[in-house]
Image (cartoon, rainbow, N blue to C red):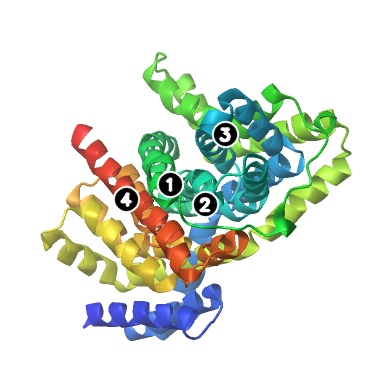
Amino acid sequence: MSFIIVICCILLLVGLITWGKINSFLAFLIVSILAGILLGLPIQKVVGAVQQGIGDTLGSLVIVISLGAMLGKMVAESGAAEKIAAVLMHTFGAKYLQWALMVTGFIIGIPLFYGVGFVLMVPLIFSIVHQYKLPAVYIGLPMLAALSVTHGFLPPHPSPTALVAQLHANMGITLLYGLVVAIPSIIIAGPVFSRFIKHIPSYPLATFLPKQKLASELPGTANSFITALLPVALLMVTTALPHIIKSTPANSAFLSFAGEPAIIMLIAVLVAAYTLGIAQGKKMKAIMELYADAVKDIAMILLIIAGAGALKQVMTDSGVSSQIAAVLQTMPVQPLILGWLMAAVIRLCVGSATIAGLTTAGIIAPLLIKANVNPNLMVLAVGAGSLMFSHVNDAGFWMFKEYFNLSIKNTIKTWSIMETIVSVVGLAGVLLLDYCI
């Protein structure tokens, strides 16, 4: 009976968000409370479970996600993203424009949240299309594939960061594995796939042609690259050092402290405040206002993550999570494929990659211990599934359609298929890693 209740609650969650058009956070709260009551939690403990789930989830994530938003905002507003794009375009040359844009999207996508990266980079795509008279979708899709992959696979983006916390993975190792999986996913979904859609007509609106800053207004090349990639570099270094230097109690304690994602992101944000802010002539007050605006931009994402944490806690306290794990363990499906499949189904129903990933994590987390699954790979498998076949219920679908001025049919043939390729290749990469390690 418990399984039927959980399935009905998930269907209700999907229905409230899709058909009822209810805010995702409110939908999670409603379903969490209802699930607690139906699953037999004492009614006086239902609200406590919801509060504990929200507190435990946000307690480990709010710092990282908020600081990540601040760093991304600074990279965008300072012109560092534009500088990185200009340098890469010059380096690759006109012959390899697609690859230049793909690498730009990958580098920019690490610190920038997907929506910010999309709005920031699409005008760059259109300026190149206008300058070289090339098909817009053919040129632009590799960059957007890179942005999508970083959004779904790599910390400090909200969904993979939250998955790392829920599945008790290691953020540094997840990032390293994520980079390995991300590169083939981007190449196949970007430059390779785009060759088959070169004929699709797209006439971007003139409104979206960029108003570029003067070269003198942009930060330096080294400054831009180092600041944007600093969190990745620090995570990789602190993950690798324990395997390189001699282990002593003092070294272990320091590396454990320095390797905390919150500490790494704090260092990156403080460095950015100086290198992209004060060193570029900005006042501290203006920098802090920029950081405050960044947190406003991701407030709803934090609430959605909190709501998912509430539902997970209710299932844990009721004991149904352990029952689900026992049943899933008997299914003749590889656990990583199962995690991917569950996230893909929820993504198809709800549209939101974040909701798909977090809902799946809450269900599948107990399986990790019983089935001896690598949690870092499960983060990536669920992340890949959460990107599966974006269609009309996903905001990203409509952004791509409207910016590139496409029909719904051609948007499905380009954007939706690209997201599907990213998802499937991502799963294949995860399974290959699982076989090798």
The percent coordinates of residue 404 (x first, y second) are 58, 59
Element on which disc 2 rests: helix
Q: Which mark is residue 231?
A: 3
Alpha carbon separation for disc pair 4 and 3: 23 Å
Q: Amino acid at mark 2?
A: Val
Q: Earlier in the sequence, mark 1 or mark 2?
A: 2
Q: Amino acid at mark 4?
A: Ala
Q: Earlier in the sequence, mark 2 or mark 4?
A: 2
Alpha carbon separation for disc pair 1 and 3: 31 Å
Dot 2 crowding, Cα within 10 Å, few <14, some 14–19, many 20+: many
Q: Nearer the viewer, mark 2 or mark 4?
A: 2
Alpha carbon separation for disc pair 3 and 2: 31 Å
Q: Which mark is residue 381?
A: 4
Residue picked out by circle 2: 137
Residue at image x 54%, y 64%?
Answer: 406
Residue picked out by circle 1: 194
